[in-house]
Image: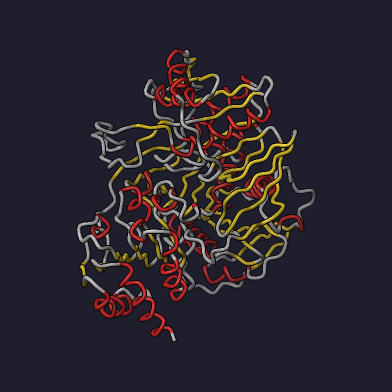
Amino acid sequence: MANKILAILEQREGSLKKVSFEAASVAVSLAKQLNLEVEAVAVGSEIKNLSEVGKCGIKNVTFLKNSEFTNYSSSGYSEVISNYAKEVNASYLIIGNTALGNDLAPRLAVQLKSGCLMDCINLQVESGEVIATRPIYAGKANFKLKLNSEIKIYTIRPNIFKADFSANENVNITLKEISNPNLKSKVVAFKKSEGKLDVAEADIIVSGGRGMKGPENFHLIESLANVLGAAVGASRAVVDAGWRPHREQVGQTGKTVSPSLYIACGISGAIQHLAGMSTSKYIVAINKDKDAPIFSVADYGIAGDVFEVLPVLTEEIKKLRS
Amino acid sequence: MKIAVCVSHVPDTATRIKIGSDRKSIDPSGVTFIINPYDEYAVEEALKTKGILGGDTIVYVLSVGGDANRETLRKALAMGVDEAILLRSEKQKDSFGIAQALADEIKSLGCELVFFGKQSVDFDNSITGQITAELLNYNCVPVVVEFKLDGNKITAEREIEGGREVIETSLPAIISAQKGLNEPRYASLKGIMAAKKKIIIEKPAASSTDFTEVIEMSLPASKQPGRIIGTDSSAVAELVKLLREEAKVI
């Protein structure tokens, strides 16, 4: 009889990621509502802050350890996690929808003969069943879905579910040394990108569009991003024009983002761009054209020249921060 | 070697979504459908790989769906793919059903290298490639921006948060393409004419049980437009104050 909810904790460089605490909190909350047991599992070689999930209400964490598990291996991680899920009869798995989670969840689903719902923004219990909401068409619409498989896997969009640190459990960590991991596919190197922050993970994003007139003017965007500790984003038009790298693209063929603050500079707001950023908590638009569609989703707007407004805004925030 | 590319047929990204009368799918009237944008990178990479391998390499393009998908299959043929196969399913399958149909066909064709787009821009699951690989027991690298095949050995770079992972694996394998992997070619006029004459092979898609049940499709609550504070830098002080005191985000 399946009876357990398992939160899968993701680590990078030996530290649990923020989304791992969100996954742990979601697992604890679902377990309460479904009256099931909950525990967490992590894979790695060394993890410093495993016991911190106690604050989210997790009492038991199992650490699947091998010196080859410092970096992700799709074959290795999926095999040890699915074996563990079978061993403890897990019926629900909760995973952060990161690059790793997106790769891992469907593989676990096949290995556990379960369904999986990706990038959920709401998980609600109705009559003992989990009903998931996930954006489709990059957020132009939402799907409400449920899984009919015996085991159910959900990945959660980062930054949407709040991590709840109100508990104070003493965490019992069980160490499992893994021998002969399956490394058919393995990460041999990591190339860090030059930009400091990734749009997918940033709490604040400053984005530039065609209104910036050329790649040589993006230093204005970078300066503002710098003083705010923000990531630099870009519209499809400027990525396609080769002004900015694709990893910065926000929108339907780029990244869908939900930061606390999104500052759109010289972006008119094509529907495929709006789809990718309109779930941001607060949106600021700076654009010369007061009729630009971006103002229809912006909380605050300045219908003015970005080249005149941006330096002043950067200065003002610099003053505030000093 | 036999190479497969799997493509889907999706609404153009400029589409404004309207919900259909069943409240579970979109109203397709007036919607332009296109080849999924990421699948164009997959087709290009397959053709590029064929160009490098030469010899008797064949590239197949596969799509699961109805007659409408023929247009997308023709697009791939026009770009230079050798054979097109429509795996017919009138019913909308979930990712697991689509993957099962593709896996069965890939197996019977004997394709050792398979390209997907990293995700379809309709349902955005981004999992069909990984599921297909698991069903076939193939290696799989998703979200790839660099791909190199050397004999049996694959070196691929995949985009993750903050950088790229360099991954080593081997054939048989599935690669899902991210924007940036290559520059998809335009179909030549000759290619388009030739594609029109090609016969698209049609087979029934393998049956499957869906794990996913759609309860409802809805539009997100539309955001109330906010205020325009000013028209030049004199509004900056007010903006900063609002962000600090009202929004509390800086």
Residue at 71 percent of width and 65 percent of height: A46
Q: Quadrant of the N terminus of chain A?
A: top right
Indicate whether A190 appears above or below B70.
Answer: below
Indicate whether B111 appears above or below A201.
Answer: above
- On screen, residue A299 versus residue A225, left or right, reads left
Residue A1 visible to the viewer: no
In x, y percent, where is residue A244? Answer: 47, 56
In x, y percent, where is residue B151? Answer: 75, 33
- In depth, the one of A58 and B145 nearer the eye is B145
How are the residues colored?
A: secondary structure
Residue placed farthest to the right in the image?
Answer: A180
Q: Quadrant of the C terminus of chain A?
A: bottom left
Residue at 52 percent of width and 30 percent of height: B6
Residue at 54 percent of width and 24 percent of height: B81
Indicate whether A165 appears above or below A255.
Answer: below
Residue A176 visible to the viewer: yes
In x, y percent, where is residue A276? Answer: 38, 52
In x, y percent, where is residue B145? Answer: 58, 46
